Amino acid sequence: MLPLMTAAPRRSYEAGHRPKFLVVVDDTEECGRAVYFAARRAGRVGATLALLSVVTPGEFQHWFGVGDVMREEAEAAARAHLARVAAHAREVAGVEPEQVVREGDRAGELAALIEDDEDIALLVLAASPGPEGPGPLVSAIVGKAAGAFPIPVAIVPGGLTDAEIDALA
């Protein structure tokens, strides 16, 4: 579960401030839908875009002696994936996304980034349209933690077409 966030005023809510949309990027198909929506919406309202990828330390923590190499490789893979996603955002909407890689628990790092960056005005998440559920991050946020965010959360269904997203964005 995500930690409760402070209710301090955010700069993203000030009049005339340029908002930033944050997309949590992973390797699922539906993530592309969330990036497409956020990029199109950011382009239309003059917002900036940030893409977050979180490297989970549990994947390499237990390997003695090779943990640092595995961490570096995981971070390099995350940066390469973010670069591809950022190129897609530039292509569809002409926005230049900020690319953020963090290490830790995904939900915790997401909450920490929102807390640290008061420019973030909207969190955009992808939801799987499949029968297995919307995905772990969406499930965690839609549950008890949804009300803890100091910003709105947009959940983009993975089954939407470009035309449908364009109509919404």
Image (cartoon, rainbow, N blue to C red):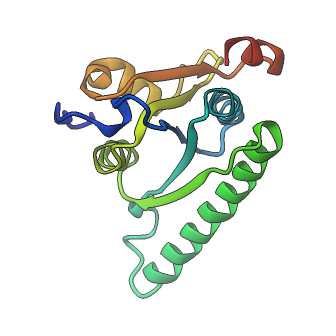
* Residue 133 relative to residue 122: left or right: right
Q: Residue furthest front?
A: 16
Tell me the quarter of the image containing the C terminus. top right
Q: How many marks?
A: 0
Residue 51 image offset from top left, x and y in percent: 56, 48
In the foreground, 37 or 159: 37
Picture coordinates of residue 13, whole percent (x, y): 35, 29
Q: Residue furthest bottom?
A: 65
Q: Tell me residue 131's x, y (percent).
A: 61, 15
Given residues 37 and 78, the one toward you in this image is: 37
Residue 144 visible to an observer of this rendering:
yes
- Answer above or below: position of 41 versus 76: above
Residue drawn at (44%, 79%) of the image: 67
**Quarter of the image where one finds residue 151:** top left
Task: From the top left corner, tell me how far across and down residue 28 is, in percent.
Answer: 66, 38
Quarter of the rendering containing residue 61: bottom left
Q: Quadrant of the N terminus?
A: top left
32 vs 115, left or right, is: right
The residue lying at 28 percent from left, 36 percent from top is 10
Q: Is residue 160 visible?
A: no
